[in-house]
Image (tube, rainbow, N blue to C red):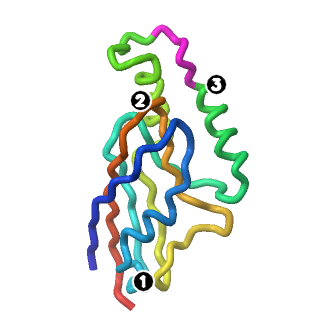
Amino acid sequence: MWIQKTLRLSAARRGFHLVTHELVNAVPELDSIRVGWMQVFIQHTSASLTINENADPDVRIDFETAMNHAVPETLPYVHTLEGSDDMPAHVKASMMGASVMIPIGNGRLQLGTWQGIYLCEHRNRASGRQVIITIQGESA
């Protein structure tokens, strides 16, 4: 069985935002999958997706701090037409990745106890972000 849906995530401020529940709610068919995979792909070049710690909100702050340290806005970028945050956002998005893949078992994502799916918004003022959710699996 194949399922594919497009989901528009609401505009988010710069930072790391848990979107696991939004993604799961967008595909109620997930309940019927006995075994399979869910891929989430973001259709943007200045935001990314990742899976990480979902319990302590300090992790989100530390992610932003670390990424800003690794990819500062003060480098002498050539691509600056869209603002000082644009090129660093492209670099961060390439470093973190445009998709995540999660196994499905018995109608549930098989994330670890403390794992969640993050939208990593790297722009100061971004519009909503579009993701494509693709599920491949066997029905229960």
Q: Main secondary structure of the magenta part?
A: loop
Q: Which residue is mark 3?
A: 69
Identity, as a three-letter code, of the amino acid under mark 3: His
| Image: magenta residue range | 71-76
* Quadrant of the snapshot with the N terminus: bottom left
Identity, as a three-letter code, of the amino acid under mark 1: Asp
Q: How many numbered circles are shown?
A: 3
From what the image shows, is residue 36 above or below residue 48? below
Q: Which residue is mark 1?
A: 31
From what the image shows, is residue 114 above or below residue 89? below
Decide which of tag 1 and tag 3 comes sooner along the chain. Answer: 1
* Quadrant of the snapshot with the C terminus: bottom left
Q: Which residue is mark 2?
A: 90
Cα–Cα span, label 1 and label 2 = 35 Å
Circle 3 packing at 10 Å, graded few (<14), some (14-19), many (20+), is few
Q: Residue furthest bottom?
A: 140
Which residue appears at 31% of the width and 45% of the height? 43
Which residue appears at 43% of the width and 39% of the height? 47
Question: Quick one: SS at disc 2?
Answer: helix
